[in-house]
Image (tube, rainbow, N blue to C red):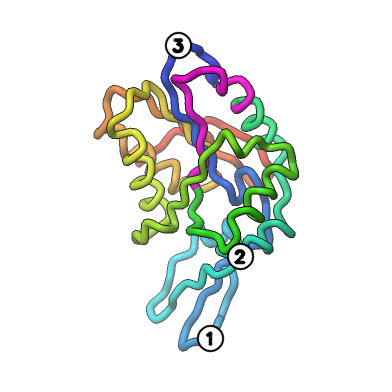
Amino acid sequence: MRLFESKIASLTIFDIDDTLFTTETQIHIVKGGKRIKSLTPAEFNVYKVKSGESLDFSDFRNAEVFAKTAKPIATVFKTAKSIISRFSAFANKKIIIVTARGDLDDKNVFLDTFKKYGFDIGKVHVHRAGNVGGSSSAQNKKVVIRELIKDSDYEMVRLFDDAKANLDALHQLESEFPNIKFETFFVDHDGSISRYKSTK
């Protein structure tokens, strides 16, 4: 990873769920007004919603659930903290979080969870793609990132995420922004980080 070139204007993006933290937050599948199934974020990434089903994301708006169950993924957390520490001295570098979550019910409880584990969240803006309201979290994230880079002078954009659909969505922006180099890094369930090459 060529993460620390001082002259390159760059945007580095981290996901939250199953990338920076594991949590016990679940997405509930509702049919006929009743919850019929609950999925972890990893399970939801590959779940195909069936006819008559709807999605209940209420857990993802609950800051207390996040605070009580969030556990840092050590490898990614260390990488993120190192990047924040080294990039914060450069005006041409920005580090952000883009999460599939929408607004949480208590912003301070949510942010205090990062601080609890020594993550300097004051230097990292959290963009909530769940507020976009699109057809999928991957497409919502693509909308958010497109807005962030469309009038920028970024030469490189990097994304760390556990969902390959989200990484593929970033690579879909390559044709729109041919002057930007896109790098993606897949976070596996064991916390390992590997360079990702989109096949879509």
Disc assigned to residue 7: 3
Q: Do the residues labelled 2 and 1 touch (CB within 8 Å)?
A: no
Q: Is residue 125 shown left or right of residue 79?
A: left
Which quarter of the figure has residue 154? top left
Given residues 66 and 197, the one toward you in this image is: 66
Quadrant into which the C terminus falls: top left
| Residue 89 included in the magenta stretch of the image | yes
Residue occupying image coordinates x 63% and y 53%: 108
On screen, residue 86 above or below 36? above
Reply yes or no: does residue 19 show up in magenta: no
Q: Residue at x 43, y 15 (%)?
A: 8
Circle 2: element type:
loop
Q: How far apart are marks 2 and 3 (CA)?
A: 40 Å
Pair 3/1: label in front:
3
Q: Residues within 10 Å of mark 2 (few under 14, many from 20)?
A: some
Q: In the rendered structure, which segment of residues is drawn in magenta? A: 84-98
| Rendered position, 94 above or below 59 | above
Inspect the image, locate mark 2, and give the three-letter code of the amino acid beneath it: Asn
Upstream in the sequence, badge 2 or badge 3?
3
Q: Which residue is drawn at 51% across and 40% down?
A: 125
Q: Position of residue 12 (x, y in %)?
A: 49, 31
Q: For this rendering, which residue is in front, 83 or 190?
A: 83
Q: What is the quadrant of the N terminus in the image?
A: top right
What mark, if any, has residue 62 been given in the picture?
A: 2
Crowding at dot 1, Cα within 10 Å, few <14 / some 14-19 / many 20+, comes out as few
Q: What residue type is labelled 3?
A: Lys
Q: Position of residue 69 (x, y in %)?
A: 72, 58
Q: Mark 1 points at which residue?
A: 34
The first of marks 3 and 1 along the sequence is: 3
Label 1 amino acid? Answer: Lys
